Amino acid sequence: MKKRTALTDSRRNPKESLGSGKRSGCQEDPDFRNRSGSRKVPDDFGRSGLHKRLNPPEAFDPRKRSHLKKEPGSCPRPDLSVRLGDLELRNPLMIASGLAGYGDDLEGIVDMSKIGAIVTKTLTLDAREGNAPPRLAEMPSGLMNSIGLANVGCRAFISQRLPRLKALGTKIVISIGGFSEEEYREVALRLENAGGFDGFEVNISCPNVREGGMSFGASPLRAAGVVKSVRSQTSRPVIVKLTPNVTDIVLIARACVSEGADALTIGNTFKALAVDVQARSPLVGAGIGGLSGPAIKALSLAKVWETVSAMDVAVVACGGICSARDALEFIIVGASAFQVGSACLRNFKTPELVLAGINDYCRVNRVRSIAEIRGTLKSVEV
């Protein structure tokens, strides 16, 4: 087997400033502000020139695809539909939890009729204010967040936000969290009784207050307990979102599936820390945050491969997906679906561009169904 050579680029964004001394989610350089004066993530999202050459925008932009000629025998409309247990999606693309708020925040910005599913913000039983600001910090190749599960609570969501979601024209997956197994069970029950959505994503990265704050997802026993509690309250598809911050993710995955998980989202953000060297304090209010974006794609890819290589389960890939090529890598490794998250902060059209790129790849390579390339990665040495 040919050994793969790691591609690295240590160059940093020349606009990155270490001397501002300001604690903010993004750099204070004027180039990082839009015309209204509000902060934004840079257009290049901290990516190196190398990454741009590997993922040229013209390869995925439908306005710049004249070089993709239709070939005889090619499939103009590949079948992109996928199944996650009993949850059927028109295509494998899902908007990750939080990016669409409670589900409808991107309405009118993203064409929902082209999206496989939207995952809401994580809902807890009671409303939460979340962590102290600042909650976002730009990294050289990603984004660190420390939101702290800020949400309106499931009661307010059911009465104020859930009724709006039925008209979006896409599948709705509600993310739920809790600080005890009983809270997970109660949130699932209230939402199940309300109806009007298609499935659950169970966020087990929440701290277990009865175990000194250790994440439910860090223990096979505690993870299984949460899944069992949710499964007892619903017959809807249950997707469990695993944390990557564990020694052996397969142990956690097996425990969740054993208690009724239909699919697994792999994974959540990686623990991260960034420091303001002038103030000598963390860049986010809670100190430790979660890293997302291009910096974690290769790490997430390995977690997905570890899981699908060890067990037969539908996996939703999440972590650093910014282009069609990124998504295709996860599918070839074995993911059934994928989520786009922080890349939307750079360009809210990213989901549509990713889908356009996947369609082009399938057409040019005569792939009639996305299932034809799923799990086709050649052997990997371990």
Image: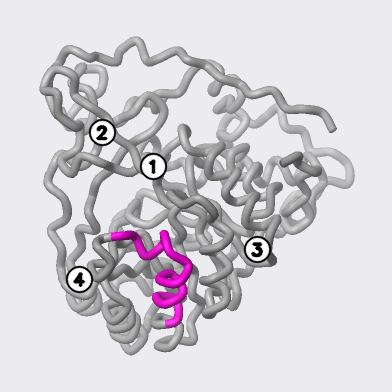
Q: Earlier in the sequence, mark 4 or mark 1?
A: 4
Residue at image position (20%, 39%) is: 287
Residue at image position (48%, 45%) is: 319
Callout 1 crowding tier (Cα within 10 Å): few <14, some 14–19, many ≥20: many
* Pointers 1 and 3 in contact (C-beta within 8 Å): no
Residue for badge 4: 153
Of helix, strand and loop, which one carries label 3?
loop
Callout 2 crowding tier (Cα within 10 Å): few <14, some 14–19, many ≥20: many
Quarter location, residue 208: bottom left
Mark yes or no: residue 173 visible.
Answer: no
Task: Please tell me the numbered disc located at residue 342.
Answer: 1
* Pointers 3 and 2 in contact (C-beta within 8 Å): no
Callout 4 crowding tier (Cα within 10 Å): few <14, some 14–19, many ≥20: some
Q: Nearer the viewer, mark 1 or mark 3?
A: 1
- On the image, the x and y values in percent for residue 265 come to 50, 59
Q: Nearer the viewer, mark 4 or mark 3?
A: 4
Q: Is residue 315 left or right of residue 346?
A: right
Q: Nearer the viewer, mark 1 or mark 2?
A: 2
> Amino acid under label 3?
Ser
Of helix, strand and loop, which one carries label 2?
strand
Q: Which residues are magenta?
A: 214-228
Q: Nearer the viewer, mark 3 or mark 2?
A: 2
Of helix, strand and loop, which one carries label 4?
loop
Residue for badge 3: 81
Residue at image position (60%, 44%) is: 302
| Magenta region includes residue 219 | yes
Residue for badge 2: 137
> Amino acid under label 4?
Gly
> Amino acid under label 1?
Ser
Q: CA distance from mark 4 to mark 2?
A: 26 Å
> Amino acid under label 2?
Ala
Q: CA distance from mark 4 to mark 3?
A: 32 Å
